[in-house]
Image (cartoon, rainbow, N blue to C red):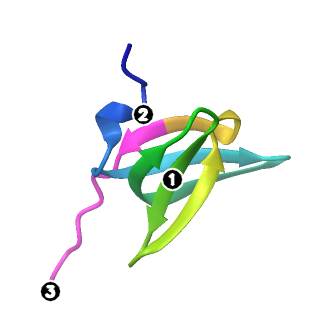
Amino acid sequence: MQSAYAVWLDQPVVLQVSAGDLKVPLRGTIVGESSDSVRFRIGEGWDVDIYKTMILAVEEDNWVSIIT
């Protein structure tokens, strides 16, 4: 059975993450997964492991840069 995170691999996403009383969105790319965490790339090559229990939602990052 495929993981729920596998469909989001290498795509720009927004993770809704909870840490204690704090809930924050994180923009980046899911680049890997283990049994208890997701490897998440923020910016240019800054990879962090986020425990799956902290992830509330995964959303497509549809933020569009406006060039003027």
Disc 3 + disc 2, Cβ < 8 Å: no
Query: Looking at the image, is mark 3 or mark 2 nearer the viewer?
Result: 2
Residue situated in front as seen by the camera: 28 or 3 = 3
Residue at the far front in the pictured view: 34
Q: Give the residue type that dot 1 points to.
A: Arg
Rendered view: 61 above or below 3:
below
Q: Split into 4 quadrants, where in the image is the N terminus?
A: top left
- Tell me if mark 2 has few (under 14), some (14-19) or many (20+) residues whose alpha carbon lies within 10 angstroms of its own: some
Q: Position of residue 37 (x, y in %)?
A: 60, 42
Q: Give the residue type that dot 2 points to.
A: Tyr
Q: Give the residue type that dot 3 points to.
A: Thr
Q: Toward which corner of the image does residue 66 lie, by quadrant?
A: bottom left
Q: Toward which corner of the image does residue 67 lie, by quadrant?
A: bottom left
Q: Earlier in the sequence, mark 1 or mark 3?
A: 1
- Magenta stretch, main secondary structure class: loop
The kind of secondary structure element at disc 1 is strand
Rendered view: 38 above or below 56:
below
Residue at the far top in the pictured view: 1
Query: Looking at the image, is mark 1 or mark 3 nearer the viewer?
Result: 1
Residue, disc 3: 68
Residue 5 - label: 2
Residue 57 - label: none
Q: Position of residue 56 (x, y in %)?
A: 61, 35
Residue, disc 1: 39
Q: Position of residue 34 (x, y in %)?
A: 54, 39
Q: Which residues are magenta?
A: 58-68
Q: Earlier in the sequence, mark 3 or mark 2?
A: 2
